[in-house]
Amino acid sequence: MAKADVQALMPDVASHAEVQVAGKLDWVGMNAIEVPVYLDGSDGRRVQTNARINAFVNLNEPDKRGIHMSRLYLHLDRALSEHTITPAALHHLLRDFLESHADLSTRAMVRLDFDYLVRRKSLVSDNSGWKQYPISLIASLDERGFDLELAFQVIYSSTCPCSAALARQLIQQQFNADFESGQPLDHQAVLDWLGTEQGICATPHSQRSAADIRLKLAPSFEAFPFLEMIDLVEDALKTPVQAAVKREDEQAFAYLNGQNLMFCEDSARRLQIALTGQSRIEDFWARCRHFESLHPHNAVAIVTRGVEGGYKPIDGHPSGWKE
């Protein structure tokens, strides 16, 4: 028997069986699909990375049993196995989703989660090392048009301004105890004292911190601005964590922290200024979390652009990162 005849005899429950309970469904599809994808690397060359993909369409016909999930998977495989991920490629993929479900669906969505690797130069030394940034792309297509969101995370260091002021006060008190008031100061003695543990008897607390960013990108089929947006955020915060570090790099990092004392509110305002006015960004949602070394809880600030009908401060992050 021919292959086509065998297929014709196979039962198709989703298409022919009576629906148990009628009703439209907002989204039906698959998540955590494992697929290798191609990206434009930070050096301009095409690179391959592993992605987890969610693919969905709505079920707009209440009397239909289900969608054709295998069609979604095959469209994904064909679209992503050879071509670099671009806005145009995702738009074309979503059109394929809808065309293959023309009798069932009116909107489609795809989300890709992957890590983006960037080689970063050390602050002072001639070394460099790799940094990894978790990225999500969320694209949707319906009768209103094509929407595209880029989400990513940047890890940085934050030094508490209050703790720094308290540490300076203790250092002043120690200086007053070690050097008698009203007596001439010996420059070399003071310089030597500053190099001792007594000279820095207290230090401000710093902590690793995270900036979670969501960007609604303006309609465009240009390449994704991965590195451009990551650099924008890191340049605003000033203290992104480092890769390859020698002593001279660590000293430079300590200086950057001292020159950029930040509460979480300060971090969020820096991002607000950096993201506002960017031509490729229609809306943004940014959350700064400082993983306190003083407290067992985190300090958090959230800022949005304030676009009517856009992101709300209470919105969660779509990328699955733990709180």
Image (tube, helix red, strand yellow):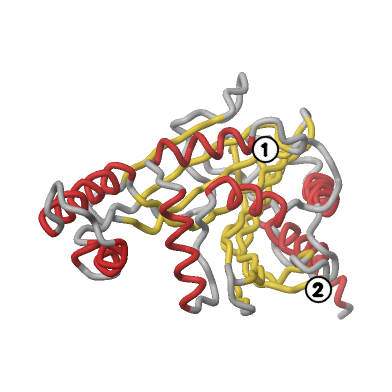
Bin the neighbour count of mark 1 within 10 Å (Cα to Cα): few under 14, some 14-19, many 20 and up.
many
Q: If the image is split into quadrants, where does the N terminus sit?
A: bottom right
Residue furthest to the front: 184
Q: Residue at x 72, y 42 (%)?
A: 148
Residue 141 relative to residue 291: left or right? right
**Quick check: can you spot residue 267?**
yes
Tag 2: amino acid? Val
State the mark number for residue 306. Answer: none
Q: Nearer the viewer, residue 126 or 5?
A: 126
Q: Secondary structure at mark 1?
A: strand
Q: Image quadrant of residue 282?
A: top right
Task: Identify the residue under disc 1.
Answer: 216
Q: In the figure, is residue 194 to the left or right of 245? A: left
Q: Dot 2 lies on which element? A: helix
Instruction: Please give the name of the residue rendered at 81% of the width and 37% of the height, measured from the top-left corner.
Output: 219
Q: Is residue 58 above or below residue 17?
A: above
Q: Position of residue 47 (x, y in %)?
A: 76, 73
Q: Amino acid at mark 1?
A: Lys
Label 2 CA crowd tier, 10 Å (few <14, some 14–19, many 20+): few
Disc nearest the viewer among 2 and 1: 1
Residue at point 65%, 48% (across, down)? 232
Quick check: 281 left or right of 273? right
Of the pair 8 and 267, the residue shown nearer to us: 267
**Inter-mark Cα distance, 2 to 1:** 47 Å
Please indicate, yes or no, whether residue 16 appears anywhere in the rendered image: no
Residue 265 picture location, percent across and down = 41, 36
Circle on res. 6: 2
